[in-house]
Image (cartoon, rainbow, N blue to C red):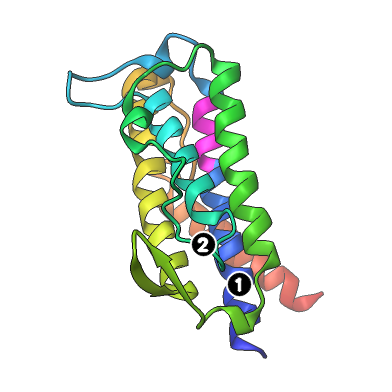
Amino acid sequence: MNLGKTYLQVVSSRFNAMKKQGDQTINRLSEEEIHWTYNDVSNSVAVIVKHLNGNMISRWTNMLHSDGEKPHRNRDREFEDDIGSKQELIFAWEKGWETLFATLDSLKEDDLLKSIYIRGEEHTVLDAIERQMAHYASHVGQIIYIGKQLLGDGWESLSIPKGKSQEYLDEMLKKHNNEKRS
């Protein structure tokens, strides 16, 4: 087993799972709901997606050879809600993730300990990946939370529904035992 290769596979799987939860939530929201905010200091789903897009494109483009904070990025503008439609939001969402996955898929185990820079601060590639994992997880969590607030009783769980933990565990153990016998 190769640790570096395994790590890259695991982290790719985790980013994919995170994206899937965001996809599922965004797909459930209407044109109006993507712009909803709780108050004036809160971000809408549209703003969060716009920020993720800007961050992903900046961090993952030419990751090994240029600072992760690209000169063309205007982070402050990412927090202006000027996304015109849900289609535009989905385009920005997909473009950010495509940039991330293209770079992640190109990385080799030897790259993980290379030094790169984000805003002039040195990181290993491994540390930069973990930094982005934490950052994106917090924002996807915000998107999910907003979706739950807006959809209320109409919300369908993205994981194990409340009150169904034991049922889910029993089902997984049964499945695992059946696979062992096969």
Q: Which residue is mark 1?
A: 8
Label 2 – label 1 distance at C-alpha: 21 Å
Q: Is residue 60 among what the camera can see?
A: yes
User: SS of the residue at dot 1?
Assistant: helix
Rendered image: mark on residue 22: none
- The segment highlighted magenta reads 21-26
Drawn side of residue 80 relative to residue 160, left or right: left
**Magenta stretch: includes residue 97:** no
Q: Quadrant of the C terminus?
A: bottom right
Q: Main secondary structure of the magenta part?
A: helix
Q: Which residue is mark 2?
A: 66
Q: Is residue 162 among what the camera can see?
A: no
Q: Position of residue 121 (x, y in %)?
A: 32, 68
Q: Are marks 2 and 1 in contact (CB under 8 Å)?
A: no
Figure quadrant of residue 80:
top left
Q: Look at the picture and state if 139 lies above or below 152.
A: below
Q: Position of residue 49 (x, y in %)?
A: 45, 32
Q: Look at the picture and state if 68 lies above or below 85.
A: below
Please name whichever residue, 69 or 101, is drawn nearer the observer in this view of the structure.
Answer: 69
Residue drawn at (18%, 19%), measured in percent from left and top? 39
Residue drawn at (59%, 59%), measured in percent from left and top? 62
Q: Residue furthest top?
A: 32
Q: Amino acid at mark 2?
A: Ser
Please name whichever residue, 77 or 92, is drawn nearer the observer in this view of the structure.
Answer: 77
Q: Amino acid at mark 1?
A: Leu
- Image mark count: 2
Q: Residue furthest front?
A: 71
Q: Look at the picture and state if 61 lies above or below 177.
A: above
Q: Which badge, 2 or 1, comes first in the chain's sequence?
A: 1
Drawn side of residue 17 relative to residue 124, left or right: right
Please name whichever residue, 110 or 142, is drawn nearer the observer in this view of the structure.
Answer: 110
User: SS of the residue at dot 2?
Assistant: loop
